[in-house]
Structures are given as C-alpha cells and as structure tokens.
C-alpha cells in the first residue's frame, strides 16, 4: 500500500468521524422531554432479596429433583427436633459447631472448643478430650464416651446462636 493510499484512507476515516460527531451534536437527546431535559433513570432493584423461611422448602428436601424416584436418601435433609436439645453431660467438653462439610464418604465438622484460641476440625471417629465423634449429620454432631452421649447442633449464625 502506497503512502498516498494510506493518506486517502486516513482522511476518509477522519471525515466519517467528524460527520458522526456533527450529527450527534445536532440531534436531540434520545428520550429527552420538553426543553431537552433527560428523565431520571428507573429506580434500582433492592440489593438483597428477602428469601422465604427454610421451612417452606421442606417438600424440596423430601422430593429432590436430581434423585431417581424423587425420594430423599437417608440421612440427608432437615432433621426435626422437638423441644430443646438435652444438656450435655457435665464431663463433656463445652463446644459449638461452626460448620459441617460432607463430600462423598467423608464428613468433618469445624468445632469451637471453649478455652481454645482457634477452631479445630473433627472427622467421624475423631476424638476430643476422650469423647469420640460417632456421627456427623447435616446439622449436628454426636459424641460418645463410656456409655454417655450428647449431640451439638450446628450454630445458626443468622440468629446469633
């Protein structure tokens, strides 16, 4: 490409850009009302949507979409608890369950033990102060020692519990 052809293309592009700028300056603003005033933009939707209570999803838990026959496999879902949970034995460590992870056949709980600066991770079969973790469910863990047993529910941080 010769220099004169490049110069001709450059001049053509500049003229086209100038023509677009000129026509945009002369045309009234899109959506402008009388006097050229532009209406305000519509109100933004709320940042956080309110979700329905967890109990309203009971049928979804009982009849999961991606399970053949739409029947919940055993041990998965919300566990109904009547009344307050029983108090742990006096010899039991004072703890709260901050999180539960279930992946494949592995289950682990993140536990905050009173008097320890950091949370610890416990797996099924793990021990804490002589107590054995015998079960980790979706919402609680169970510990046993010498015929005594107690459960600790997963802490609900939304309610400050």
Image (cartoon, rainbow, N blue to C red):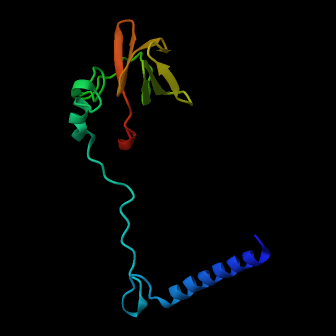
Side of 1 relative to 107 (left or right): right
The quadrant holding residue 107 is top left
Q: Count the labels in the image.
A: 0
Residue 138 placement (x, y as % from top left): 35, 27
Q: In which quarter of the image is residue 158?
A: top left
Please tell me in which quadrant of the rendered image residue 22 appears. Answer: bottom right
In the rendered image, residue 3, in percent from the top left (x then y), is placed at 79, 75
* 140 in relation to 53, above or below: above
Pick the front one: 147 or 13: 13
Q: In this view, does 100 lie above or below 9?
A: above
Q: Residue furthest top?
A: 146
* Above or below: residue 131 compared with residue 26: above
The answer to whether one can see residue 71 in this image is: no
| Image coordinates for residue 73, horizontal then vertical, percent | 28, 22
Residue at position x 29%, y 26% in the image: 85
- The image position of residue 60, as x and y in percent, is 24, 35
Q: Say whether residue 121 is left or right of residue 42.
A: right
Q: Residue at x 36, y 70 (%)?
A: 43
**25 or 84: which is nearer to us?**
25
Q: Which quadrant is home to the N terminus?
A: bottom right
In screen coordinates, is 4 left or right of 107? Answer: right
Q: Residue at x 39, y 85 (%)?
A: 32
Furthest toward the right, the residue is 3
Quadrant containing the C terminus is top left
Q: In this view, does 98 lie to the left or right of 5?
A: left
Residue 140 visible, this orientation: yes
Near-viewer residue (44 or 32): 32
């Amino acid at each position: 490409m010769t220099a004169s052809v490049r110069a001709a293309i450059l001049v053509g592009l500049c003229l086209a850009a100038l023509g677009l700028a000129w026509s945009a300056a002369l045309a009234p603003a899109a959506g402008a009302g009388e006097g050229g005033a532009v209406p305000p933009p519509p109100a933004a939707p709320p940042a956080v949507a309110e979700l329905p209570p967890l109990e309203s999803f009971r049928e979804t838990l009982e009849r999961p979409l991606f399970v053949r026959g739409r029947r919940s496999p055993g041990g998965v879902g919300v566990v109904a608890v009547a009344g307050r949970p029983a108090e742990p034995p006096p010899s039991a460590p004072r703890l709260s369950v901050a999180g539960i992870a279930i992946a494949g056949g592995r289950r682990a709980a993140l536990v905050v033990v009173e008097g320890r600066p950091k949370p610890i991770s416990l797996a099924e079969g793990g021990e804490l102060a002589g107590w054995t973790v015998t079960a980790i469910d979706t919402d609680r863990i169970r510990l046993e020692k010498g015929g005594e047993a107690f459960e600790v529910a997963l802490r609900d941080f939304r309610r400050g519990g």
